[in-house]
Image: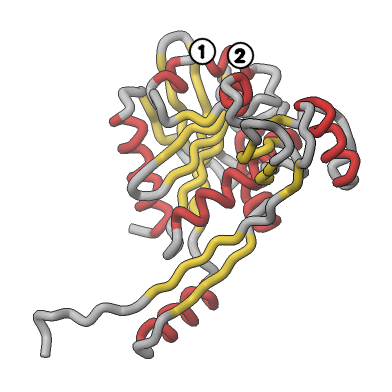
Amino acid sequence: MSNSENEEKEVKECIKLLGLWVQKIPKKSEKSPDFLVKCDRYSYLVELKTKFDDPAIQTAFERDLSSGGVVEEIYSTGRQNAISKVISSACKQLIMGETEVDFKVVWLHAKGHHPDFQMYDFESTLYGHEVIVDRGKDDGFSGFCYHYSNSDFYNHRKVLDGAVVSTSDEMKLCLNVCSPRYYLFRESRFREVFEEGVLDPIELERNGDALIVDSDVDRRDEVAVMRYVVDKYNLKKAMKMPMQQISASVLVPDKGKI
């Protein structure tokens, strides 16, 4: 069984465990989406995309790890062009689906040696979020600002209603607040079965836990974007905080072997 078949089987079982009816769509071409999901009165197309490590990076990591030292890795965060291309490919396949459905979802599955890093990158690419810190108010603010930069959810708002981001140990449903079907999707059974594992920027904003740039301000003009955020939320000393993902790995000897 190939890697893609293994991942499809794993995700199909996840969907079944959520209590949803799911069918693998027969492959008529590489353009066909992967799954048809039904629950209550709605139907959904789901396209699975699995992200593995770059083979060269994985080979170098394993080589350095086997040498016996500590392998340190530092990655920048933010929207990733490689992930954006994968999402664009998924959208093309969802559009090519021959079955009429109510909603379309991309499932991004992380299978690298740092799947939690990949999940963060999935969300960064989908939402174009950045960390904003403001120390000018009594209670201050520190958290994500969604759609601060270019975002794939906005770019594909006519197609994508949401995305599932997952590893082999966890999964989360991300709602596309830019979709014209957002409010319907938010009330659907598909969203309900994820219970607390749902990322909804509008709900986070309502609770004071996130910011949203819901404007057509040019995302290439970061000064204008920050001005919009400051004015909308009456921030005083706001700044964007660049983030990094850092890890250190070491190979632990098997104590059962001499």
Mark 1: give few (<14), some (14-19) or many (20+) Cα within 10 Å.
few
Answer whether residue 43 is visible to the viewer in this image: yes
Closer to the camera in the image, 203 or 37: 203
Q: Amino acid at mark 1?
A: Glu
Element carrying mark 2: helix
Q: Which residue carries the number 1 mark? A: 187
Residue drawn at point x = 31 percent, y = 79 percent: 251
- When asked about the image quadrant of residue 22, the answer is top left
Element carrying mark 1: loop
Residue 170: x and y in percent read 37, 43
Q: Is residue 169 above or below residue 43?
A: below
Residue drawn at point x = 33 percent, y = 36 percent: 14
Q: Horizontally, is 180 left or right of 72 in the view?
A: right
Closer to the camera in the image, 227 or 24: 227
Q: Amino acid at mark 2?
A: Tyr
Query: Which residue is outermost to the top?
Result: 41
Q: Which residue carries the number 2 mark? A: 183
- How many labels were placed on the picture? 2
Residue 228: x and y in percent read 85, 32
Label 1 with label 2: CB-CB less than 8 Å = yes
Residue drawn at point x = 44 percent, y = 79 percent: 71
Q: Quadrant of the N terminus?
A: bottom left
Residue 94: x and y in percent read 61, 34
Residue 229: x and y in percent read 79, 33
